[in-house]
Image (spheres, helix red, strand yellow):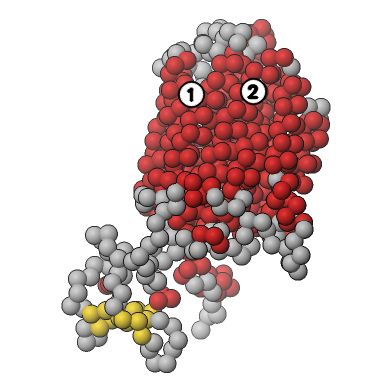
Amino acid sequence: MAPVPPGIRLLVSFNRDQWYKALTFALTFLLYTSFHLSRKPISIVKSELHKNCSSVSELATAAASSSQQPSRVSLHTDMDCSWKPFDKSNYKQLLGAMDYSFLCAYAVGMYLSGIIGERLPIRLYLTVGMLTSGLFTCLFGLGYIYNIHSLGFYIFVQVANGLVQTTGWPSVVTCIGNWFGKGRRGLIMGLWNSHTSVGNILGSLIAGYWVSSNWGLSFIVPGLIIAVMGVVCFLFLIEREYSLLMTEGGGRMPAKNWNGVNGHTELYLQYKEGKTQSYDTELLLPRDNGTVCVPVQQVVVVKSESEPSAISFMGALRIPGVIEFSLCLLFAKLVSYTFLFWLPLYITKAAHLDAKKAGDLSTLFDVGGIVGGILAGVISDKLGKRATTCAVMLLLAAPTVSCLADHDCMLLVCGGLVNGPYALITTAVSADLGTHKSLKGNARALSTVTAIIDGTGSVGAAVGPLLAGLLSAGGWDQVFYMLMTADFLALLLLLRLVTKELTSRKPRPISTVE
């Protein structure tokens, strides 16, 4: 008999729950990757919406004389190098207004999204959000194809897209928090949160491929991707552990008698065949004298009929650490999203590169963000000090931001230090606070707590790009001073929690959010 291949041995060594955990981890990772993938094109297309017309004319003439075969053909062949209404001298303010409209709607909607998400099926809520987000992202790109030059149209699309995209973050964090406990949460969340940077990188590459020839496709393709992922979410997302056996009519498996069998300590669910049953696995169960015994570890643990009620907004604010981390994230996310929306344009102007090359170079910042998020999670797990880890990275980020203005090689380091605290607060810290001991086991607070923290951070995300648009008119140095100030303010807001962590006398320091 031939030996079993080692790969098959590895596959069968995992039980079913472990496979479902892996599926949830991978699926939620891909789902939120598609969210960020669809947000990135606007930052890549900015340098195409307003260009240096003289430079474009010279490049077009040189390309026409040197190339025998044209490359990808643009739908607009006239010499209007800038896209109305962004062809005016106040184009930076107009572009900043588009960013602000999206992020302001996102910030306002986020506070409501978590509360709504806890009262609706997460799978359906997330699916609808992704499908509508794909629709509005495609609509922005259709503005190019149908030659739409109304600022109101683009503002409306941005506001609508910002609102529907709020369905994403509370939903995926709640799912991942339901499946994974507190053990090594920083490492798991750090790895998982790299979807933000992966989405930004993919969004930059996809948008950059079409930005110079047909920037409408820079939006349409990401819009189609997030819509397809919405369908995948509907088909495969499992909201929480042990939610697999639900009746077709929406009821739960009735818990009749819990007995041990043959001296085993495992619990078994016993139910009578005379009752109405329509479970997905019924065809797989043996029939023996009208009684079926199902091992719990092979099927499900039934949820209690008396579920805890969802937490209120004010109740979530009273959880220790929520206010401090929320305000800290406001400034940390201000810095991160300013880079997200303005870094490609800054590289275009400072390094005199075209839109595609600037977009490709800006991905170094996101690569650093992946490493920074993972390191922040690992270090905070090892030390048990979430606030201290964030504070140290924020302290180091400020001078790094100032060096970025002169050294492109600092993109990697800056990305890690800027996105590290942002990633840690929005994932591991949010999950810790959403399962705080003061909640007495009420896991339904996770979505609301996550929405409060990320919603407050999104206020900073809305203000940052808007200020960058206003300040950049006086020079990019003013933008970098604003970013360094925001980093220091984020650090100050954590000082009380840092002091509490450092003065802890426990053998192994426990994070202040526990």
Would you say residue 475 is visible in this rendering?
yes
Residue 453: percent from left, percent from top: 56, 44
Is there a contact, CB below 8 Å, between mark 1 and mark 2?
Answer: no
Tell me if mark 1 has few (under 14), some (14-19) or many (20+) residues whose alpha carbon lies within 10 angstroms of its own. many
Which one is in front, 435 or 233? 435
Q: How many marks?
A: 2
Residues 191 and 117: in front is: 117
Give coordinates of residue 26: x percent, y percent. 52, 54
Tell which tag, 1 or 2, sits nearer the viewer.
2
The local secondary structure at tag 2 comes to helix
Residue 285, label in figure = none
Residue 132, how many percent across, how many down? 39, 35
Residue at 46%, 20% in the rendered image: 154
Residue 287 vs residue 128: left or right?
left
Q: Is residue 285 above or below residue 66?
A: below
Label 1 SS? loop
Identify the disc placed on residue 467: 2
Q: Is residue 64 left or right of residue 154?
A: right
Which quadrant does the C terminus fall into?
bottom right
Q: Which mark is residue 216?
A: 1
Look at 44% across and 40% down and name the residue there: 112
The answer to which quarter of the image holds residue 510 is bottom right
Separation (CA) of disc 1 from disc 2: 27 Å
Residues 237 and 315: in front is 315
**Callout 2 amino acid:** Leu
The reply to whether residue 217 is visible in this rendering is no
Residue drawn 51% across the image and 49% down it: 316
N-terminal of the pair, mark 1 or mark 2, is 1
- The amino acid at mark 1 is Gly
Residue 394: % across, % down: 74, 42
The foreground one among 372 and 352 is: 372
> Residue at point 58% right, 21% down?
96
